[in-house]
Image: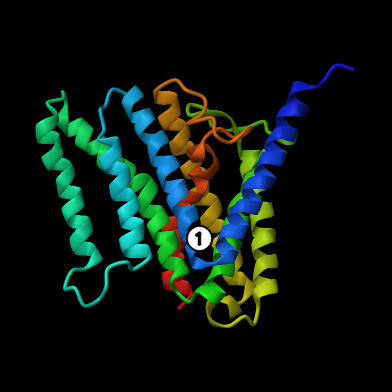
């Protein structure tokens, strides 16, 4: 019997997606340290892929320094690795690291130094900064907050699954054809419907958990809408970056998905909006 390539692709995507989900859930639930290790792995992989894309676009980013800075940002801020009695804050340290990028460019003698500096700093902002915010959320009472982080991640992936399935089955009207020809409005609303349903379910399951976890399910329905809208833009932005350098995937480390940015693009882009949502409505 002749195998269906589309089915094989979907099967590989499903299996690898399940493995990633298990690894992510395990890292978040196990301990703050495994969660931190997860953030650092995504940071290193995502920044490496971003700098490869920037290089293909003609920039010459300071990839090693950018990645070290991204890792240190997560460690210094997210893990609080600077003792309170040394007289130096995480903000002081990170500010210095940003300006070291400018100093190093003086000695590289490369063309377009402004472009190189911009690409280096953009990689930090695009990948490391959202992961920092996710780490800061985790510091808001780990025993309860870890379930909030799991809920957020599940909503991101529910939107992804809903958009994919509905888009494949019923997609007709293009959402943003210039950037992503396969995305449709039908898929968008399918992802939105599943994400909100999952969000309401999460809110119901966590009702009475204390703190923000005891909020009404409306809170989680609203969070789902924030995740869907910002996540779609995140997916489109990453597609724009890849199309600008004529590549299909940011990497090949995840079978059926591509690279770190391909798998976590919506999550990374939605984190700042979700963080703000928590700050405003979860207090």
Residue 152's spot in the image, x, y percent? 56, 60
User: Residue 201, relative to residue 282: is it above or below?
Assistant: above
Number of callouts: 1
Closer to the camera in the image, 20 or 275 = 20
Q: Quadrant of the C terminus?
A: bottom left
Q: Residue at x 64, y 55 (%)?
A: 195
| Left or right relative to 249: residue 184 | right
Could you tell me which residue is drawn at 55 percent across and 68 percent down? Answer: 146
**Quarter of the view holding residue 115:** top left
- Tell me residue 117's x, y (percent): 20, 37
Q: Which residue is more in the foreground, 163 or 134?
A: 134
- Label 1 crowding class (10 Å Cα cut-off): few <14, some 14-19, many 20+? many
In the rendered image, the quadrant that contains the N terminus is top right
Whether residue 64 appears in this view of the structure is yes
Residue 86 locus on image (x, y percent): 19, 73
- Residue 32 drawn above or below residue 85: above
- Residue at point 35% right, 53% down? 129
Q: Is 73 left, or right, of 220 in this rendering? A: left
Give SS at disc 1: helix
Q: How is the image coloured?
A: rainbow
Which one is nearer the viewer's eye here, 69 or 194? 69
Residue at coordinates 65% horizontally, 74% vertically from top-left? 206
Residue lying at the far right of the rendered structure: 1
Residue 162 can be seen in this image: no
Mark 1 sits on what residue?
Answer: 35
**Picture coordinates of residue 42, whole percent (x, y):** 46, 47
């Amino acid at each position: 019997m002749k195998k269906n390539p589309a089915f094989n692709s979907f099967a590989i995507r499903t299996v690898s997606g399940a493995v990633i989900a298990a690894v992510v859930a395990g890292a978040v639930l196990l301990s703050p340290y495994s969660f931190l290790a997860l953030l650092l792995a995504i940071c290193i992989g995502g920044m490496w892929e971003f700098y490869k894309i920037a290089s293909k676009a003609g920039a010459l980013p300071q990839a090693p320094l950018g990645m070290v800075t991204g890792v240190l940002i997560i460690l210094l801020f997210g893990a609080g690795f600077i003792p309170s009695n040394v007289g130096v804050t995480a903000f002081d340290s990170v500010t210095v690291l940003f300006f070291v990028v400018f100093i190093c460019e003086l000695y590289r003698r490369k063309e377009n130094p402004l472009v190189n500096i911009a690409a280096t700093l953009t990689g930090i902002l695009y990948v490391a900064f959202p992961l920092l915010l996710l780490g800061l959320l985790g510091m808001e009472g780990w025993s309860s907050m870890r379930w909030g982080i799991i809920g957020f991640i599940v909503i991101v992936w529910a939107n992804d699954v809903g958009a994919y399935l509905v888009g494949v089955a019923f997609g007709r009207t293009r959402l943003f054809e210039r950037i992503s020809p396969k995305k449709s409005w039908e898929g968008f609303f399918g992802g939105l419907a599943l994400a909100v349903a999952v969000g309401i379910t999460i809110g119901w399951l966590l009702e009475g958990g204390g703190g923000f976890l005891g909020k009404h399910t409306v809170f989680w329905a609203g969070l789902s809408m924030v995740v869907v809208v910002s996540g779609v833009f995140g997916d489109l932005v990453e597609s724009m970056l890849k199309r600008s350098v004529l590549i299909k995937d940011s990497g090949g480390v995840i079978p059926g998905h591509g690279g770190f940015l391909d798998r976590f693009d919506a999550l990374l882009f939605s984190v700042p909006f979700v963080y703000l949502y928590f700050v405003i409505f979860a207090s």
